[in-house]
Amino acid sequence: MTIEVRPAEVFDDVRTLVGPKRDDASVCWCLSYRIPSTINNKMRGQERGEFVRDLLASGPLGVLAYEGDEPVGWAAVAPRADTTFARNRKIPHVDDLPVWSVWCIRVRPGYRGKGISHALIEGAIDFARDRGAPAIEAYPLDNQGAKVDLTMAYAGIRKNFEAAGFTWAADTTSVLSGHPRVLMRRDLR
């Protein structure tokens, strides 16, 4: 399998990875950390997809992994200042660098276990570096080898970020699915 990671620019491909199965659903689209919760919680159904379509008009919202023309994976990545991590009380700021954040890794069923999440992390690193980021952060689960519920694995797993050259930068008070999250960082200079 040949995987290519590209900027997430095509709405239908983004929808394939983070759009809900039902048009009337009021979940996902990977908006929870991208926009304030007051806005996120008010949007319902197709309004969420249209919001993402409008955001895409300003540029890519992250990266997508493709097998040929088929979108098979997603990673949300943006400047931390443009996300709710800029104000998150559970995820500390290590310093004042204008770092970028990668907060969601999703691989479609049928494609998992093939290294796509690793390709997505590398793609997110390249995406941030190409846009001038001095460093990139992630807030993965520190599951210490324990099984993680796939729904909550969106934050990524510490060992996958370590494999991509990220190092521990700080503990957090955030917990997902019973696992603590840690702040991992990779210098891009």
Image: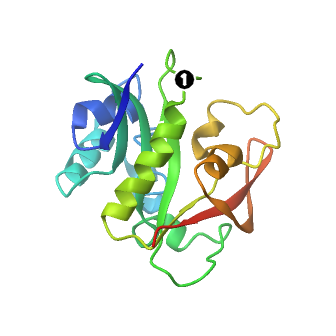
- Residue 98, quarter of the rendered image: bottom left
Which residue sits at x=40%, y=70%?
133
Image check: 188 left or right of 181? left
Most distant residue in the top direction? 110
Most distant residue in the left direction? 57
In the image, 19 versus 64, the foreground residue is 64
Where's residue 7, x and y in %? 29, 46
Which residue sits at x=67%, y=62%?
167
Q: How crowded is the residue under tag 1: few (<14 C-alpha within 10 Å), some, or many (20+)?
A: few
Q: Report the residue marked by disc 1.
A: 114
Which image quarter is the C terminus in?
bottom left
Where's residue 69, x and y in %? 25, 23
**In the depicted structure, whether residue 38 falls above or below residue 109:** below
Most distant residue in the bottom direction? 96
Where's residue 165, x and y in %? 60, 56
**In the depicted structure, whether residue 32 falls above or below residue 13:** below
**In the depicted structure, whether residue 21 falls above or below residue 11:** above
Image check: 12 left or right of 181? left
**Element type at mark 1:** loop
Q: How is the image coloured?
A: rainbow
Which residue sits at x=50%, y=55%?
102
Q: Is residue 45 visible?
A: no
Q: Is residue 141 visible?
A: yes
Image check: 167 left or right of 164? right
Callout 1 amino acid: Lys
Which residue sits at x=47%, y=47%?
122
In the image, 128 versus 75, the foreground residue is 128
Image check: 188 left or right of 164? left
Which image quarter is the N terminus in?
top left
